[in-house]
Amino acid sequence: MDECCGPSHPDGYDEVFDGRFAQRVARRYGARGLSRIERRLVEFLEDAGVRGATVLEIGGGVGEMQLELLARGATRTVNVELSNGYERDAERLLSEAGVADRVTRLVGLDVAVDPEAIEPADLVVLNRVVCCYPEAERLLTAAASRARRALVFSHPRRNWVIRSRVAIENRMHRRAQVDFRSYVHRPQAMREAVRRAGFEIRDERSGLAWCTVGAVRAL
């Protein structure tokens, strides 16, 4: 069975997003529920029509948002993840919620490289994922090709504070000989990629560190 950022090949992800990282995410979810950013994404999908919908989450980690969307009426979810580190905690959460038969987890599949390997879904989610991928526009274009109705994603704000923090983290990874890298992509370029894929942006919100973007397929 099946939080942000790195090279377009799974080795770097496994080094950073390992079992210990997954345990921290699962414990936080158990203690506090969804984060503020996650709640924004879920609320947008509720407004877009989650009841009876299928959901694809790219880089969903332990799958906490999928559990919430299933509880709100989604019929099935698919999680695509590059790291193997989440699986044990994801299986436990699914078992505790009694929804393991409604969730498919795929590990090691790069959606940006092979989008046709994933069945389309009504709703597609990418939370704290574009900052983990070197080609955000390519990833979002691929994700949009899998979305029948709505696409929602989050990304870090592109200011000097965030960019400096990411640069420091990347230097630390290089010194530790870890392949993983984080990215602060241009917000306008990401939005244009979504529009070119046939979507209309309906919701944009900014916080201190993260922004959320919600889009629906244009008629």
Image (cartoon, rainbow, N blue to C red):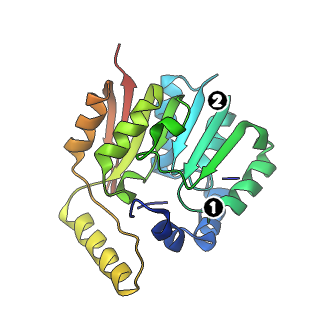
> Callout 2 environment at 10 Å: few (<14), some (14 to 19), or many (20+)?
many
- Residue located beneath label 1 in the image: 86
Q: Does label 2 or label 1 sit earlier along the sequence? A: 2
With respect to residue 64, does 55 lie above or below? above
Residue 12 relative to residue 194: left or right: right
- Residue located beneath label 2 in the image: 74
Asked whether the beta carbons under mark 2 and mark 1 sit within 8 Å of each other, the answer is no
Going 25% across and 54% down the picture, which residue do you hit? 185
Label 1: state its secondary structure: loop
Q: Nearer the viewer, residue 88 or 156?
A: 88
Residue 196 got which mark?
none
- For this orientation, the residue located farthest to the bottom is 175
Using the rendered image of the protein, determine whether residue 212 is visible from the camera's viewpoint. Answer: no
Quadrant of res 138: top left
Q: CA distance from mark 2 to mark 1?
A: 22 Å
Residue 15 lies, in percent from the top left, at: 51, 74
Q: Amino acid at mark 1?
A: Tyr
Using the rendered image of the protein, determine whether residue 152 is visible from the camera's viewpoint. Answer: yes
With respect to residue 154, does 167 lie above or below? below
With respect to residue 50, does 2 lie above or below? below
- For this orientation, the residue located farthest to the top is 219
Q: Amino acid at mark 2?
A: Ala
Going 34% across and 32% down the picture, which residue do you hit? 203
Residue 107 relative to residue 99: left or right: left
Residue 167 lies, in percent from the top left, at: 26, 73
Quadrant of res 118: top right
Q: Nearer the viewer, mark 2 or mark 1?
A: 1
Residue 145 lies, in percent from the top left, at: 41, 31
Residue 55 lies, in percent from the top left, at: 57, 34
Label 2: state its secondary structure: loop
Residue 16 relative to residue 101: left or right: left
Going 65% across and 68% down the picture, which residue do you hit? 23
